[in-house]
């Protein structure tokens, strides 16, 4: 611990005195002179460069006789310090002191040190040293203002602005210009004298175009932190900016005339004077005469022009505006009489909503487009007059994207600064609503507004009639609540509601929406519904989704309004639970899709399995309250079923299809240890006789997940080697086609067989990616530097097994828990789950390599349904199985055929090739080509009777028959190039078909 400065000096002196007294006695001590300094460290702290600080050091006489203070100096000769022995008698009497002055005047930033040496003629402590330190900090130089904006100048012109610099110290200040663009900026002063204030003139003289910035730096020493003045300027070619530019004229016949205009705005900082207007050809004539007028900064002058069409004359020219600013200058703008300017177009030009009951709501859509060919049109809003309270509009949309209004209230709504609409196919859509509040005939004028130069507004006449109606009587199912049961966190489920009018009066229904979304977990996949009129004994259905991201109990509400003044508001409670469950259903929903009324529906299946590491008992499987009783279990559970870890059973669901419309019901799976049953949604739609409806959603292109399912039986050596040989060229094809490939490998082994297979599972991968022990990457990206070697190594799954169960290992690999978890809780191996392999947006291709057929036990249709539902509703075309399997009786393999593998391949739109073939590249390239671009082919679910009644729609809009063809061999609709749907777009195919055998 450092002692007190005075105490230390005093103690040293006393020790010396006492030591002497012990030897010499009191007589000697009485004549000793002893000097001490009152500190051994002097710290000035932070001092700005150029400022002064002073401290004192005292030489104290602690002896009994006087001594003289002889000298004090700095040993390091640091110029930032001054040391001076204080004035007065140099003789220091006992008990008195003499002052040493130490002054700190930092000349640079940073730490400055010195050693002060004090000398006396005392007997004891004749010389002493004091360490001195101080920190030089930036000088507080005053600058006003701290920012200079020269605004906008014409190139090769200049502007001068002043800044006041105040120097508060006794050092001179140096001025320099630095920064990104220092060259155009300069200052007339390079030095500010000490303790003074100066006005400094700075100049901006740009020699090039564009925004420029720099800074004026003022320093009190070399290397010091500068005080700065930010400098900013912009350089333009000329003072005027024209709008519009080019100046558009209507396309007119020869000998006719047309007028247009442009607005010239002075964008510079100084006023300018217009001298004259000159055109490049006399076909263009200025009508305005602004000569001699002064245009201030930011001011606008309008210039009217006329064009006279001549047979041999040009239809493009220039207008030159000659003006004076710092000198004579000019600005030019193109004059364009070729036509094609941005032009507002609206279709239709009138909307008749027909007759609607009071309290109802119906919608129509108008399309806003740009009929020009040069540049975008800006849509800026709408306004309405007449009976506007009976009508309203939604927000404008472009495809799936909506654009909220920036301001205003109906009947005037704004979309500023504007929504651009490009020429050609680009367009905005605007829903218009008729929502009468009283009986009558109503008319309104809706004006669509834009920046079209000549026709900025287009008017659409809105008409509608309203009638009185009796109070609505309705049935809404399910009741009393839409119960989603248990949906595990991170997954989603869809159920639905059905509204039916059983009364004698019509029902007007509107504003169908989720009024309480439970914190965002409940929503309508198709968005809120406007509504409509439901006649007697008619109805409609819609979906409601539940997607919890975390565990919890959730409640919500569906709300709609009906034409019943006494009770207009209708509410349906929603509830759902999200907890982890030992049960997993694959697929997680049963979707029959659209079914014809006159065609029997084949039952569909789900596989219920135990994902936990201990047995689970399923005590019940029952269909809860839905929108109808159209669903049934083909073989209801009559007794509890206990499932060992990984074990499972199939549930088969039938669909009666004798009630038209959409149907939604919950299938609940119950276990005694889980209070809420696991939900498996049941979905179907019955259409009219003879008409089949297939629906799809276009997926993302250029992403492909590939699962190789490789047989590990004892006869597979040559076939495994052949597949490995094809991998380098296959990956190169993926790279060439821009396909992002992700690869996993599993075997056809469902149970362990022997250690000869390697990989840590003894041949019983049971869907786990190979190698189970993680000795190599199990999920391989095609872009990895070691992709070829890693995939080839993983294809060596061994040859130890005697049973091919590839369809079931495929289902296990792509189902929970393996597909969702890093570790399979049912097995002893660590981190053997398949999480991270399957990407939601990617296509899925399963490639089977086997020299005999599958022996999984479940029927091929079970695995077809699994792959068709893997990517979700409407995405059956996104998953295919391909097989390198025996297809030729002349091929000597372990099995004589591959009927099961072939059935699943054909049922999912995949292909098979002969495993005995010498080159597997042909089939593998098909896998890549299918994923390399947006899907053009969409397989149909039934065989059409002909093309006469076949129709195709994309996003609800009919597609001309010239833009698609029917491929009978694939039984698929194939879109022509240029007509292929974009990612996320819905596709619907309606056709008359032959009923398939259920």
Image (spheres, helix red, strand yellow):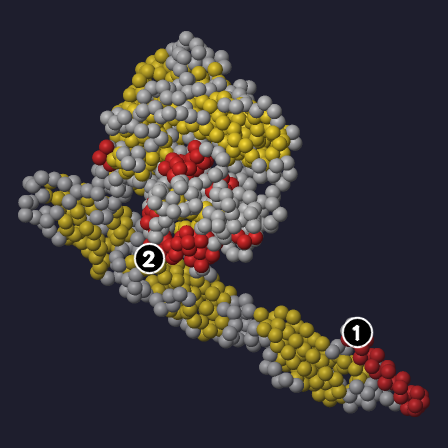
| x and y percentages locating residue 722 in the rendered image | 39, 54
- Eyeballing the image, is 310 above or below 640? below
Secondary element under disc 1, as helix, strand or loop, is loop
Residue at 69 percent across and 82 percent down: it is 116
| Category of crowding for the residue at label 1, using alpha-carbon neighbours closer than 10 angstroms: few (below 14), some (14–19), many (at least 20) | few
Q: Is residue 41 left or right of residue 393?
A: right
Residue at 52 percent across and 25 percent down: it is 666
Residue 209 seen in this snapshot: yes
Q: Which residue is mark 2?
A: 152
Residue 561 seen in this snapshot: no
- Eyeballing the image, is 325 above or below 879? below
| x and y percentages locating residue 257 in the rendered image | 11, 40
Q: Which residue is mark 1?
A: 3
- Quadrant of the rendering where the C terminus is positioned: top left
- Eyeballing the image, is 197 above or below 664? below
**Residue in front for this viewpoint, 567 or 887:** 887
Secondary element under disc 2, as helix, strand or loop, is strand
- Quadrant of the rendering where the N terminus is positioned: bottom right
| x and y percentages locating residue 771 in the rendered image | 52, 52
Residue at 39 percent across and 19 percent down: it is 660
**Residue in front for this viewpoint, 128 or 433:** 433
| x and y percentages locating residue 870 in the rendered image | 45, 38
Residues under labels 1 and 2: Cα distance? 66 Å
| Category of crowding for the residue at label 2, using alpha-carbon neighbours closer than 10 angstroms: few (below 14), some (14–19), many (at least 20) | many
């Amino acid at each position: 611990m450092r002692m007190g400065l005075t105490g230390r000096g005093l103690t040293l002196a006393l020790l010396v005195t006492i030591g002497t007294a012990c030897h010499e006695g009191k007589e000697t001590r009485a004549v000793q002179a002893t000097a001490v300094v009152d500190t051994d460290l002097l710290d000035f702290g932070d001092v700005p460069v150029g400022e002064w600080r002073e401290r004192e050091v005292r030489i104290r006489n602690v002896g009994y006789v006087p001594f003289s203070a002889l000298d004090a100096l700095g040993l390091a000769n640091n110029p930032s310090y001054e040391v001076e022995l204080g004035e007065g008698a140099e003789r220091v009497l006992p008990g008195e002191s003499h002052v040493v002055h130490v002054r700190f005047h930092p000349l640079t930033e940073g730490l400055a040190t010195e050693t002060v040496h004090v000398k006396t003629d005392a007997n004891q402590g004749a010389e002493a040293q004091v360490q001195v330190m101080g920190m030089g900090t930036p000088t507080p130089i005053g600058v006003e203002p701290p920012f200079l904006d020269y605004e906008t100048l014409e190139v090769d012109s200049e502007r001068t602005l002043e800044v006041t610099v105040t120097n508060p110290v006794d050092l001179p200040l140096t001025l320099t210009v630095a920064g990104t663009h220092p060259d155009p900026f300069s200052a007339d002063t390079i030095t500010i004298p000490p303790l003074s204030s100066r006005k400094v003139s700075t100049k901006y003289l740009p020699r090039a175009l564009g925004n420029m910035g720099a800074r004026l730096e003022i320093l009190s020493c070399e290397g010091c932190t500068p005080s700065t003045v930010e400098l900013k300027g912009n350089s333009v070619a000329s003072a005027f900016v024209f709008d519009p530019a080019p100046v558009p004229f209507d396309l007119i016949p020869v000998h006719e005339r047309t007028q247009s205009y442009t607005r010239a705005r002075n964008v510079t900082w100084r006023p300018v004077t217009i001298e004259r207007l000159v055109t490049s050809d006399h076909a263009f004539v200025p009508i305005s005469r602004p000569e001699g007028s002064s245009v201030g900064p930011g001011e606008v002058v309008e210039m009217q022009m006329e064009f006279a069409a001549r047979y041999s004359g040009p239809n493009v020219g220039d207008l030159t505006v000659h003006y004076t600013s710092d000198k004579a200058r000019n600005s030019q703008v193109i004059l364009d009489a070729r036509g094609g300017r941005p032009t507002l177009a609206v279709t239709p030009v009138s909307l008749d909503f027909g007759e609607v009951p009071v309290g109802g709501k119906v919608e129509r859509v108008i399309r806003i487009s740009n009929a020009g060919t040069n540049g975008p049109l800006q849509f800026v809003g709408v306004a309405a007059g007449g009976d506007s309270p009976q009508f309203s509009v939604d927000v404008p949309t472009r495809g799936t994207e909506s654009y909220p209004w920036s301001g205003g209230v109906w009947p005037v709504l704004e979309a500023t600064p504007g929504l651009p609409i490009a020429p050609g196919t680009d367009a905005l859509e605007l829903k218009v609503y008729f929502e009468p509040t009283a009986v009558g005939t109503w008319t309104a004028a809706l004006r669509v507004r834009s920046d079209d130069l000549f026709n900025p507004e287009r008017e659409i006449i809105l008409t509608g009639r309203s009638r009185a109606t009796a109070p609505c009587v309705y049935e809404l199912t399910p009741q009393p609540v839409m119960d989603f049961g248990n949906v595990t966190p991170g997954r989603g489920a869809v159920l639905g509601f059905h509204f039916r009018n059983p009364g004698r009066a019509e029902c007007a229904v509107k504003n169908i929406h989720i009024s309480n979304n439970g914190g965002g977990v409940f929503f309508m996949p198709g968005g809120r519904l406007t509504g409509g009129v439901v006649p007697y004994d008619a109805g409609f259905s819609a979906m409601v989704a539940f997607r919890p991201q975390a565990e919890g109990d959730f409640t919500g509400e569906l709300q709609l309004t009906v034409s019943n003044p006494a009770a207009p508001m209708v509410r349906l409670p929603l509830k759902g639970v999200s907890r982890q469950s030992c049960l997993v259903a694959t697929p997680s929903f049963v979707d029959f899709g659209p079914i014809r009324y006159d065609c029997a529906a084949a039952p569909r299946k789900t596989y219920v399995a135990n994902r936990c590491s201990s047995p689970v008992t399923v005590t019940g499987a029952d269909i809860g309250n839905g929108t109808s009783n159209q669903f049934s279990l083909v073989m209801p559970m009559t007794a509890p079923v206990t499932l060992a870890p990984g074990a499972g059973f199939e549930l088969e669901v039938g669909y009666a299809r004798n009630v038209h419309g959409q149907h939604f019901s919950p299938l609940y799976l119950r276990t005694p240890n889980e209070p809420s049953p696991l939900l498996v949604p049941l979905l179907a739609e019955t259409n009219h006789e003879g008409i089949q409806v297939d629906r799809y959603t276009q997926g993302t292109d250029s992403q492909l997940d590939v699962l190789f399912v490789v047989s590990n039986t004892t006869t597979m050596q040559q076939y495994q080697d052949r597949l490995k040989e094809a991998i380098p060229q296959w990956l190169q094809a993926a790279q060439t086609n821009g396909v992002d490939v992700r690869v996993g490998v599993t075997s056809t082994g469902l149970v362990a067989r022997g250690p000869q297979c390697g990989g840590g599972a003894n041949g019983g991968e049971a869907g786990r990616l190979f190698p189970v022990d993680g000795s190599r990457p199990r999920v391989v990206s095609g872009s990895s530097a070691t992709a070829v070697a890693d995939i080839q190594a993983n294809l060596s799954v061994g040859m130890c097994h005697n049973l091919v169960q590839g369809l079931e290992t495929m289902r296990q690999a792509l189902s929970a828990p393996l597909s969702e978890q890093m570790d399979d809780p049912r097995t002893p191996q660590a981190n053997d789950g398949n999480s991270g392999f399957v990407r939601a947006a990617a296509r899925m291709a399963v490639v089977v390599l086997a020299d005999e057929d599958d022996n999984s036990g479940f029927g091929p249709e079970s695995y077809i349904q699994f792959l068709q539902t893997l990517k979700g509703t409407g995405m059956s075309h996104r998953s295919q199985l391909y097989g390198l399997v025996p297809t030729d009786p002349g091929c000597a393999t372990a099995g004589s055929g591959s009927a099961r593998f072939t059935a699943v391949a054909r049922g999912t739109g995949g292909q098979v090739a002969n495993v005995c073939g010498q080159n597997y590249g042909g089939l593998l390239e098909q896998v890549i080509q299918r994923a390399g671009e947006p899907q053009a082919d969409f397989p149909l679910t039934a065989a059409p009777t002909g093309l006469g009644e076949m129709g195709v729609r994309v996003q609800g809009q009919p597609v001309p028959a010239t833009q698609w063809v029917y491929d009978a061999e694939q039984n698929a609709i194939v879109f022509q190039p240029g007509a292929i749907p974009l990612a996320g777009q819905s596709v619907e195919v309606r056709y008359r078909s032959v009923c398939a055998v259920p």
